[in-house]
């Protein structure tokens, strides 16, 4: 007999009275015992509906206890869970539903009209009613999804193309959180402050499931800088994207001295703060450390492979680097033929891991082409590993590696230098087709104040730290960079 889902087994093993979801405004806290009971009730309702067991259920619910209970209930009902984002517009929701073809939609009462408009042909259940229901007389309590069954489908961020459905097995999810438990020392007495969206790997798997895997407490909080600073005083773990850290530091710098002192004291209780989903500028790393005394831990992963690299929990963390291989993961830096390169030579990251996805939904060809002849996943990211084994990302091979004048340039390297200019708040660099250079190094800059930097000023500033062929040759000053909900810059929109 195949082993059951490790995630559901872990949930059932936690002390029933211990806190799973902290109380929030207008909502009581939820213990692990309550979470398990409500998940079983949800499963009882869903399992009695046609095509749900063995099928898929998409759900649109705000972060909180109802989201978690619904997720685990879908799993207990033997279905594939597809979380949708409240931040997405109707066309984005419609794309996911049309591609995933779920048997049922579950939505909170407030979000149901939007989902009904996006997918009028699919039946919708109201989350509040499902979670509160008494389970029908079924054998749901004895349903144990197999570890090798697909339990979750997440859609890629769409930074380089149309979002694709990534199917993940229960075993792959358990491998991710188990690896991070070892690497980051997750503890049962941890308190996670959760401000991230729940339809991506970062917020759902790394943060939420990472905490629930060890029996820790999760406190959900809609992100606002001042409120988040206040809430850090009660947390031991915090996870965010660089955009959030930038907004936190903007609020910190603008706050009066007494408030900054209070926020600093509250943040001293954190044992771990991580950054991911996008590159973290070294200046921001230093600013947060100066305000809190805590060095942010950067890591690297993808929806398809879970988490692959991480700076160490103990020991020095290198700003701008994503660290070494996580437990159970093997990352190679390779040339185009797949040959593993020596230290200090840039190449593509290729990965072997038990966290590997099962495949792209409905696209066997795309799945097959994502692996090389040795069975390694081709990430499409370019990086370089130093002699100590620490990896630094150079960018997406397709968009962050610029081929200009016969050179291969890293857009991320150029961005890091330009970000240090006092008149630059944000910057994105990429190559634009050019008859002379092949690709022209082009910068899109969001100014820090009313004075707009000129191309000549940026070139003069960067010339001291960059080779002449790496200098930007074109400049666009814009009000803001286009980003997705995880803070990743959508460079294809700039092009």
Image: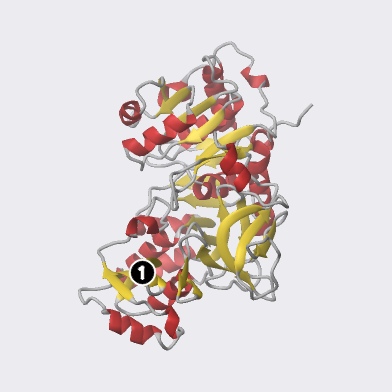
In this rendering, the answer to whether 365 lies above or below 491 is above
In this rendering, the answer to whether 326 lies above or below 210 is below
Query: SS class of the residue under badge 1?
Result: strand
Q: Residue furthest right?
A: 1
x then y, percent, for residue 40: 58, 24
Q: Locate residue 91: give its quadrant.
A: top left
x then y, percent, for residue 392: 58, 69
Q: Residue placed at 56% from the left, 64% from the top?
A: 382
Residue 187 or 99: which is nearer the viewer?
99
* Image quadrant containing the C terminus: bottom left
Residue identifier under label 1: 427
Residue 206 appears left or right of 106:
right
Residue 210 appears left or right of 59:
right
Q: Residue placed at 44% from the left, 62% from the top?
A: 242
Q: Locate residue 26: give its quadrant.
A: top left
Disc 1 crowd, CA 10 A, few/some/many (<14, 14-19, 20+): many
Q: Name the colouring of the figure.
A: secondary structure
């Amino acid at each position: 007999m195949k082993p059951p889902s490790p995630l559901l087994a872990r949930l059932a093993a936690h002390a029933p009275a211990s806190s799973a979801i902290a109380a929030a405004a207008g909502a009581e806290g939820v213990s692990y015992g309550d979470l398990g009971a409500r998940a079983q009730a949800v499963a009882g309702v869903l399992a009695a509906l046609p095509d749900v067991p063995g099928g898929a259920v998409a759900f649109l619910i705000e972060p909180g206890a109802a989201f978690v209970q619904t997720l685990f209930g879908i799993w207990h009902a033997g279905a594939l869970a597809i979380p949708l984002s409240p931040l997405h517009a109707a066309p984005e929701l419609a794309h996911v539903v049309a591609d995933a073809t779920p048997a049922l939609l579950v939505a909170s009462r407030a979000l149901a009209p939007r989902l009904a408009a996006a997918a009028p042909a699919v039946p919708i259940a109201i989350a509040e009613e499902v979670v509160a229901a008494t389970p029908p007389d079924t054998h749901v309590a004895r349903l144990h999804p197999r570890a090798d069954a697909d339990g979750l489908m997440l859609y890629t961020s769409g930074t380089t193309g149309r979002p694709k459905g990534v199917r993940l097995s229960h075993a792959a999810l358990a491998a991710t959180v188990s690896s991070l438990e070892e690497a980051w020392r997750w503890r049962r007495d941890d308190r996670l402050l959760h401000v991230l969206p729940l339809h991506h790997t970062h917020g759902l798997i790394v943060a939420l499931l990472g905490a629930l895997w060890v029996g820790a407490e999760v406190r959900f909080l809609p992100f606002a800088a001042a409120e988040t600073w206040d809430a850090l005083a009660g947390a031991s773990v915090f996870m965010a994207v660089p955009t959030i850290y930038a907004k936190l530091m903007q609020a910190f710098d603008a706050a009066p001295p007494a408030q900054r002192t209070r926020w600093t004291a509250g943040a001293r209780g954190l044992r771990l703060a991580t950054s991911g989903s996008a590159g973290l500028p070294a200046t921001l790393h230093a600013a947060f450390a100066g305000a809190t005394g805590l060095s942010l831990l950067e890591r690297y992963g993808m929806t398809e492979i879970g988490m692959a690299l991480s700076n160490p929990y103990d020991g020095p963390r290198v700003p701008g680097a994503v660290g070494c291989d996580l437990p159970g993961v093997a990352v190679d830096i390779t040339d185009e033929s797949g040959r593993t390169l020596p230290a200090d030579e840039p190449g593509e990251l290729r990965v072997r891991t038990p966290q590997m996805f099962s495949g792209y939904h409905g696209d066997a060809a795309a799945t097959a082409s994502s692996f090389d002849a040795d069975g390694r996943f081709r990430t499409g990211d370019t990086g370089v590993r130093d002699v100590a084994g620490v990896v630094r990302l150079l960018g997406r091979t397709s968009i962050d590696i610029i081929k200009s004048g016969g050179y291969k340039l890293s857009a991320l390297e150029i961005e890091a230098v330009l970000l240090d200019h006092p008149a630059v708040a944000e910057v994105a660099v990429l190559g634009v087709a050019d008859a002379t250079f092949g690709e022209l190094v082009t910068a899109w800059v969001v100014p820090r104040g009313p004075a707009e930097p000129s191309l000549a000023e940026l070139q003069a500033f960067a010339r001291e730290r960059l080779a002449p062929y790496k200098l930007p040759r074109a400049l666009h000053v814009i009000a803001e960079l286009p980003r997705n909900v995880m803070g990743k810059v959508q460079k294809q929109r700039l092009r």
